């Protein structure tokens, strides 16, 4: 089971009956055995590669779609080498942001249906072939099932299998498949040339706001983006934090972490704690809404206990904005907290292990800038910056995406139970 967890890069449940927990067991073998994975089947690998080459032989507009399982498959570097050899356009799915270097000349942006980067949705739809690398297609990642590649144009490369022309090739590791393809593929620049011909431009960036003006969502995102370095990780909670992080231009090495498979809220706070424990050398930034924060707020106390300098941007807009955009109702209202004030509670000042967490409030751009300076200087614990914005203040992408997802989730069932 431990080997499965390491191989799949996912949590597992390990249950031991209480009546045998104290019994002796055999000593474990070498740890190297846990990391050994079965090699690709050579015949299946060669067949998958040859079939893929045949599939794209007469297609010039070939695009690569990077999915959210690419990293777990250990295929990030192989994907870059393949993209460079192919010469085509490369887009990332939303949850795969940062899994492909955005400074790479073949990168065109996020493919996310109606809320894609400028020109990306049209480029992907016009492509003769789409090679999807370890994707996850669900209602969130496809903007309410409106952005699914045409099966007739699709090569589906999963972490351990490849599907081409309706034929599945099992026991093929994605890394091996991409490495072998990179050695044999011919240049296919049509999709990238098409994208460039659109002159779609880039995402509009907010200009610096008046420092004394009331704080708005766009100004928060602008100031957070200015913090990004190759050593930064942004953990973006389910909600408008997705779209704010999605709009940021990442320097090579910067990371963004989403949870889009289940869309559960509150995951980001304990995730940021765990990430900071595992990668304390990185600048770890958490972007979270007030509603989500209330589910798992206590994990900030663990950041205080271990003196982890996580910078938390908490958006206080008095409710579940993402849910308002999907389906509004009184259940989206929450009791407001003094979020910045919680840091004194978590510090336990006066106790034997008083912490060094800081809680700050920002109601203007100028106050946010000053709070960020304090956060950067605080290396002995987390800094929570409570950012106050209006309830209706969110990205236009969230509004569009929310309508699409709401329409998909409210559709009538197609099949009836017999």
Image (cartoon, grey):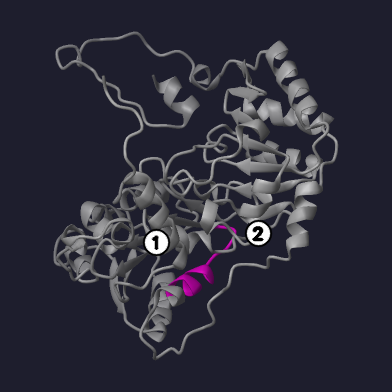
Q: Position of residue 220 (x, y in %)?
A: 43, 73
Q: Position of residue 142 (x, y in %)?
A: 49, 45
In magenta stretch: residue 297? no
Q: Residues within 10 Å of mark 1 (few under 14, many from 20)?
A: many
- As rendered, which of 145 and 78 lies closer to the eye? 145
Total marks shown come to: 2
Q: Residues within 10 Å of mark 2 (few under 14, many from 20)?
A: many
Q: Is residue 66 visible?
A: yes
Q: Position of residue 315 (x, y in %)?
A: 32, 68
For the residue labelled by badge 2, is the local secondary structure a helix, a strand or a loop? loop
Q: Position of residue 238 (x, y in %)?
A: 36, 53
Q: Earlier in the sequence, mark 1 or mark 2?
A: 2
Quadrant of res 181: top right
Give the extent of the magenta segment.
220-231
Q: Residue at x 78, y 61 (%)?
A: 197
Q: Is residue 333 above or below residue 275?
A: below
Numbered circle sitting on residue 197: none
- As rendered, which of 377 and 94 lies closer to the eye? 94
Q: Is residue 298 visible?
A: no
Quarter of the rendering occupied by the C terminus: top left
In magenta stretch: residue 225? yes
Q: Residue at x 56, y 38 (%)?
A: 71
Q: Is residue 89 above or below residue 206?
A: above
Furthest residue toward right = 186
Numbered circle sitting on residue 119: 2
Q: Kindly identify which residue carries mark 1.
A: 240
């Amino acid at each position: 089971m431990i080997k499965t967890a390491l191989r799949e890069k996912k949590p597992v449940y390990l249950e031991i009956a209480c009546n045998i927990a104290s019994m002796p067991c055999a000593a474990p073998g070498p740890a190297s055995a846990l990391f050994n994975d079965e090699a690709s089947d050579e015949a299946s690998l060669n067949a998958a590669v040859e079939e893929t080459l045949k599939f794209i032989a007469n297609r010039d507009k070939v695009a690569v779609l990077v999915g959210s399982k690419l990293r777990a498959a250990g295929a990030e570097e192989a994907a870059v080498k393949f993209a460079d050899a192919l010469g085509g356009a490369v887009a990332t799915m939303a949850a795969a942001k940062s899994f492909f270097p955005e400074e790479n000349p073949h990168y065109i942006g996020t493919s996310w249906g109606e809320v894609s980067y400028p020109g990306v949705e049209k480029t992907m739809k016009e492509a003769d072939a789409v090679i999807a690398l370890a994707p996850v297609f669900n209602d969130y990642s496809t903007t309410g099932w409106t952005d699914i590649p045409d099966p007739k144009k699709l090569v589906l490369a999963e972490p351990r299998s490849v599907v081409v022309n309706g034929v599945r090739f099992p026991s093929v590791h994605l890394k091996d498949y991409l490495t072998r393809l990179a050695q044999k593929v011919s240049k296919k620049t049509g999709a990238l040339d098409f994208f460039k011909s659109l002159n779609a431009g880039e995402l509009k960036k907010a200009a610096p706001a008046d420092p004394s003006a009331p704080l708005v969502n766009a100004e928060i995102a602008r100031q957070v983006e200015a913090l990004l370095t190759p050593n930064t990780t942004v953990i973006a909670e389910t909600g408008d934090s997705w779209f704010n992080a999605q709009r940021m231009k990442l320097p090579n090495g910067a990371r963004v972490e989403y949870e889009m498979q289940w869309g559960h809220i509150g995951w980001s706070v304990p995730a940021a704690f765990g990430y900071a424990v595992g990668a304390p050398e990185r600048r770890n930034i958490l972007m979270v809404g007030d509603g989500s924060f209330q589910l798992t707020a206590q994990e900030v106390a663990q950041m205080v206990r271990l003196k982890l300098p996580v910078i938390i941007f908490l958006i206080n807009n008095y409710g579940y904005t993402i849910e308002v955009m999907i389906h509004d109702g009184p259940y989206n209202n929450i009791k407001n907290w003094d979020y910045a004030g919680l840091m004194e509670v978590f510090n336990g000042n006066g106790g034997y292990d008083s912490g060094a967490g800081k809680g700050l409030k920002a109601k203007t751009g100028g106050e946010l800038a000053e709070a960020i300076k304090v956060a950067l200087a605080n290396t002995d614990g987390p800094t929570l910056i409570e950012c106050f914005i209006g309830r209706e203040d969110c990205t236009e992408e969230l509004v569009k995406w929310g309508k699409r997802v709401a329409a998909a989730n409210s559709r009538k069932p197609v099949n009836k139970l017999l």
